[in-house]
Image: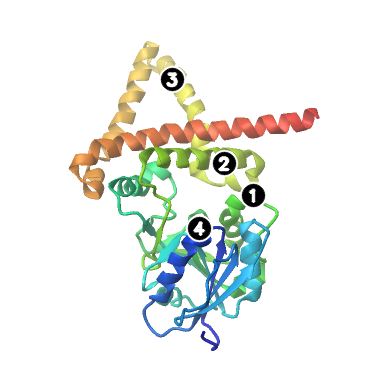
Amino acid sequence: MLKLHPSLSIIIACTRPQTVLQCLDGLSKQEGQIIFEVIIVGNCPAIIDTYQRFSLRLIDCQAKHANIRRNKGIENSKAPLIAFLDDDTIPDPHWVAQALQLNPNDKLIITGPERPTRDHWKSRLAFAVSQNKITEGLPGHVNQKSAFVSWTEVPFCNCVIPKAIFDQIGYPATDIPWDMDDFEFCNRARRVAQFVNVPKLSVCHDRYPDSITKFILYKAKLRIRTGEKLISHPNIYWKIPAVVLSALCPYLLIMTLIIIPLMIDSPFYISVISLAGLYLIIILSQIPIAISKIGFRMCLLYLAMIAIIHFVTVASVHAGIISRLFSKIRLLHD
């Protein structure tokens, strides 16, 4: 085990000890002679530290909130740079070297893109669809360009943060739902820092199942939570244009269907056909991207998945909104 002072502390909030071993294997294959430490907090794997490439510390933590676990990792860290990885990510061999390009004195937070862990055509298709700008709305996780990005595009599953920023604005919040952890922190951090996407800070991430049904259900679950948090934490989620658009989409559509006939003095069905035609044109405009990403043979399936995810997103966000509103009404009634 390395004893020298590390340049980077990598913190992994672990709930899946069976997958974190792959992450550790990835970290053991990093390029260059760089001193870094890895701190696993949570459900620690039952392993003996045999990693010669880095110092490994296991901290048991019964609290399940990821930020409670991350904060324990920060408190025990020794490096001026803090990195977060998820327990189901596998960093590329140049990941640590790229992380250390960040100056600990800079007011910058960096993140990078991911690729599927599974080598299956359905996983590759799900990933290709997720890369499309009109599918997700936010390019976080899949951005392949080196550029300054929004605070909404920096996931805790893959990012590097100077420790001085935590000293300035505080640690990640623990009084929020676990699945808005990065949004809450980066919303605070944008007062003092900028955010940069670095393509070489890349990982494989097990978020793209080898089943189209599972992928759609996964997206639906995420969007339901988005709708719930839009009501429970409007101070953050109403600042995200893609979320607001998905929430307002049905009402904008209804207004358009009413206004267009009045403006051009035409039957209602003409408006429906016009809007459907416009949407079809938008979907068909993605054909060149579909061919370049996934090939001609799966082009139609790619386009169909975009349309399905659009429908699932709007429906699921509203399901979440309605669910949270009813919860609030019940609380007021009680």
Asked if the residues shown at circle 3 and circle 1 are in contact, with their CB atoms under 8 angstroms apart, the answer is no
Residue drawn 52% across the image and 77% down it: 49
| Distance of label 3 from label 4 (alpha carbons) | 38 Å
Q: Which residue is mark 4?
A: 155
Asked if the residues shown at circle 2 and circle 1 are in contact, with their CB atoms under 8 angstroms apart, the answer is yes
Q: Nearer the viewer, mark 3 or mark 1?
A: 1
Mark 4 or mark 2, earlier in chain:
4
Residue 177 - label = 1
Mark 2 or mark 1, earlier in chain:
1
Most foreground residue, 64 or 282: 64
Residue drawn 64% across the image and 67% down it: 60
- Location of the C terminus (image quadrant): top right
Task: Give the residue type that dot 1 points to.
Answer: Pro
Task: Give the residue type that dot 2 points to.
Answer: Arg
Residue 197 seen in this snapshot:
no
Task: Identify the image quadrant of residue 11.
Answer: bottom right
